[in-house]
Amino acid sequence: MTQERRRRVTIEQAASLVQTLAIVAAGAWAVYTFVYEARIKPGLEPPAVSVRTDLVRAGERGDRVAIRSTVTRTNVGRTGVRILGLTYNVVGISARFGADPGRAAAFAASLPAAASVGSARDYALTEPGTVILRQGTLFEGATDAPAEPSDLNPGEAVSRDLILYADRTQFDFLRVEVSFAFAKSDEAPVPLHFAAGEGGRLSLMPRADCRAEPETCRRLKTTDFATEFSLW
C-alpha cells in the first residue's frame, strides 16, 4: 500500500470515527434531554394546587337556605403533591342600605395609604362578617393522630361535598373561604395544628418554629380561595 493510500485510509477512518462519536453524542444528549424533561425537571418544580368551589342552592325551609358546596382540589403542577390539611370557613355578611354622607368621606380619606379600596354608593357591608361554619381536616403526615392520606398525582383532582345552612333574615350573602396546606410528596411532611384567627376563622399553622426551622416552613405551601353566594 502506498503512502498516499495509507494516508487516505487513515483520514477516512478518522472521519468515520468522528461521525460515530457525533451519532453517539447526539443519542446520549437525546436520552439526557428526555430524562431531564420527563424526570428531573418536574421534580425540581414547586408543587401547585388549585381550588374551585361550586355553590348550589339545595333547598329551603322557611327563612333557612340549604346550600351544597363542592370543593375541588387539583394538582396543576408536574410533581406529586401531599395535601397536609384544609380549613373551611363560611362567613355570613349583611348589607346596610341607605345614604351615608360619611361613607364617601371615609373612602376618600383612605385612598393615600390603603393597599386595597372599595366603596358602594348606596350600601355598606358588615365586614369582616360572622363565621357561621368552620371545619378543618389534617391529613396523614400533618398530625400524630390517625389520619387518612391525601396525595395528588399531576393532573389529579378530588372533590368534597358539604351541605351548609344559613338564615337569610340574618345575612344577605355568604363568603366561603377555603385554604389548603400542602408539600411535595417526595419531601418530609410538615406537622400542622389548627388556630383561631380573625373573628374565629379557622386556620392552619406549622407546629415548627419557623425562625428556628426555616427549611421546614419553606416546604409548606398554601392555596387560598374564596367565593360568594347570595341568599336572595
Image (cartoon, rainbow, N blue to C red):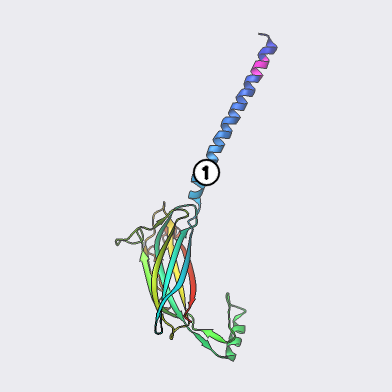
In this view of the protein, can residue 1 be seen by the observer? Answer: yes
Residue that protrudes farthest toward the top in the picture? 1
Residue marked by disc 1 = 36
User: With respect to residue 197, does 34 lie above or below?
Assistant: above
Crowding around mark 1 (Cα neighbors within 10 Å: few <14, some 14 to 19, many 20+) is few
Residue at image location 45% in from the left, 63% down from the top:
72
Residue 211 position in % (x across, y down): 43, 63
The one of 229 and 8 positioned closer to us in this rendering: 229
Magenta segment: 7-11
Where, by quadrant of the figure, is residue 123 drawn?
bottom right
Principal secondary structure, stretch drawn in magenta: helix
Where, by quadrant of the figure, is residue 144 drawn?
bottom left
Residue that protrudes farthest toward the right in the picture? 4
User: With respect to residue 87, does 39 lie above or below?
Assistant: above
The one of 53 and 107 positioned closer to us in this rendering: 53
Residue at image location 59% in from the left, 28% down from the top:
21
Q: State yes or no: residue 9 in magenta.
A: yes
Where, by quadrant of the figure, is residue 68 drawn?
bottom left
What amino acid type should be assigned to the residue bearing mark 1? Tyr
